Amino acid sequence: MFIKRNMSLICQRLYFHLKNLHWNFFIPIIVADIFLPFICLISYMSEKTRPFFAMTVMRFSLIIIPICSIWWVIFINRDYIEGQGNELLFVCKNKIKTMDTFIAFILFFFVSIIQFAFYIQADSSLKYEPVKLFCVCLFFYCFVQFLTYLTKSIPITLLMVLVYTIANPMIAYSIDGAVFPIFYDVTPLTMESAKASFMPMVLAGVVLLLISVYFNKRKLRFN
């Protein structure tokens, strides 16, 4: 009964959070679910070669989907950091609700990853790409939560995430293979790349999230 009531409150809060995003709600959907498939379709129609198509999918999805996956999270957190007078604060006691943001993150990730069913049909070498993307997106989510609690600033959090994202391709071209914290790897996922970058990324993300939850509950006050 308690779990059912708690989930009902989470769903209600999430509904109001997403409603309060206004036009920010649609930006990641347009970019990840319309713009990205359009780029991949143009690539497929122009070259019609599997290696080029697979590389195009990996190259653009590794930048676009992680950024889009934390877009809702950042602007939901803004309600607690910068949203003085927001009616949600009266029931949330100015504590960021991690479960709310995590459900929003998972919801968007699975919506954006549906397109990979078509990419995998076109090139089977992409069959593990959703796993790679989930590892990267999960780290992004945990990184955003940690930065939000640490800086208490949405602009700083967004800026640091953008710098990290832009720096990844630049550094990746100068090294051989994926090595944590470099996630930009435009080759099919292998056990070696998983051990070198993506598994450490998940573990580091979980540690950052646990630290964030602790400080959110024990130390931090917003507004």
Image (cartoon, helix red, strand yellow):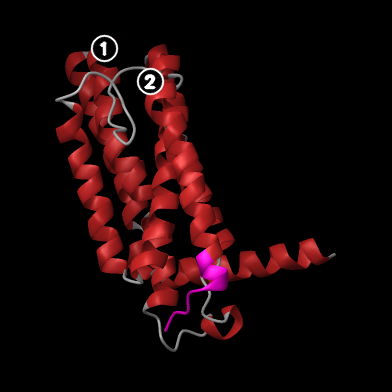
Looking at the image, which residue sits at the far bottom?
85
Q: Amino acid at mark 2?
A: Ser
| Residue appearing at x 58%, y 78% in the figure | 92
Pointer 1 and pointer 2: residues touching (CB < 8 Å)? Answer: no
Q: Amino acid at mark 1?
A: Pro
Vertical position of residue 47 compared to residue 116: above or below: above
Name the element at disc 1.
Answer: helix
Label 1 and label 2: CA atoms lie apart by 19 Å
Name the element at disc 2.
Answer: helix
| Place of residue 55 in the rendered image (x, y in percent of width and height, measured from the top left) | 25, 20
| Place of residue 34 in the rendered image (x, y in percent of width and height, measured from the top left) | 32, 42
- Residue in front for this viewpoint, 55 or 195: 195
Q: Specify whether residue 190 is in view.
A: no
Q: Is 106 within the magenta?
A: no
Q: Earlier in the sequence, mark 1 or mark 2?
A: 1
Vertical position of residue 13 compared to residue 35: above or below: below
- Residue in front for this viewpoint, 69 or 115: 69
| Residue appearing at x 38%, y 65% in the figure | 150
Looking at the image, which residue sits at the far right?
1
| Place of residue 51 in the rendered image (x, y in percent of width and height, measured from the top left) | 26, 12
Q: Quadrant of the N terminus?
A: bottom right
Q: Which residues are magenta?
A: 215-223
- Residue in front for this viewpoint, 32 or 173: 173
Q: Residues within 10 Å of mark 2 (few under 14, many from 20)?
A: some
Q: Is residue 21 left or right of residue 99?
A: left
| Place of residue 25 in the rendered image (x, y in percent of width and height, measured from the top left) | 39, 61
Q: For the residues carrying marks 1 and 2, which lies nearer the camera in this image?
A: 2
Q: Residues within 10 Å of mark 1 (few under 14, many from 20)?
A: few
Q: Which residue is mark 1?
A: 51
Q: Which mark is residue 193?
A: 2
